[in-house]
Amino acid sequence: MVRHFIKPGITGLAQTNGYRGEVENEQDIIYRVKYDIFYLENWSLLLDLKIIYLTVYNAIMGDKKAY
């Protein structure tokens, strides 16, 4: 439930690491929750900048799970 303390946004650590879109198996949701909890416990400006960079990178380079 700690995952719900994070305000939703347009991107996140799980999304930039390929865990976005439709849940295809149980491992997808487990890693989404792990990344969200990691973000909550380790938040920093540098981590936010990394997420922004990875979001832009993935948008330019493409990804099989991107829509």
Image (cartoon, rainbow, N blue to C red):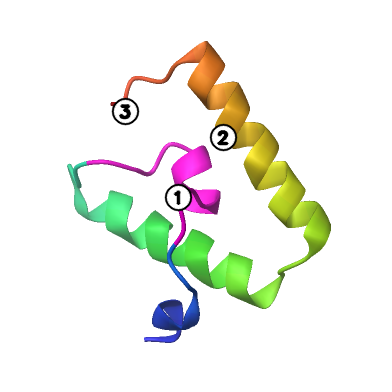
Amino acid type for the residue under numbered disc 2: Thr
| The image quarter in which residue 50 lies | top right
Nearer the camera: disc 2 or disc 1: 1
Up/down of 9 relative to 65, above or below: below
Mark 2 to mark 3 CA distance (whole Å): 13 Å
Q: Work out which quarter of the rendered image holds the C terminus and state it.
A: top left
Separation (CA) of disc 2 from disc 1: 10 Å
Q: Is residue 27 above or below residue 16?
A: below
Q: Residue at x 47, y 50 (%)?
A: 14
Q: Is residue 63 above or below residue 46?
A: above
Badge 3 is on which residue? Answer: 65
Residue under numbered circle 1: 10
Crowd around label 3: few <14 · some 14–19 · many ≥20 (10 Å): few
Q: Is residue 67 left or right of residue 2?
A: left
* Marks 2 and 3 close (CB-CB < 8 Å): no
x, y (%) of residue 44?
78, 65
Q: Amino acid at mark 1?
A: Ile
Q: Which residue is mark 2?
A: 55
Query: Which tag, 2 or 1, sits closer to the chain's start?
Result: 1
Are the residues tagged 2 and 1 within 8 Å (C-beta)?
A: yes
Using the rendered view, name the quadrant where residue 38 is placed: bottom right
Residue 63 location, x and y as percent?
41, 20
Give the SS element for disc 3.
Answer: loop
Question: Which residue appears at 61% of the width and 66% of the height?
Answer: 39
Q: Is residue 7 magenta?
A: no
Type of secondary structure dominating the magenta stretch: loop
Which amino acid type is shown beneath numbered disc 3? Lys
Q: Residue at x 19, y 42 (%)?
A: 22
- First reached walking from the N terminus: tag 2 or tag 3: 2
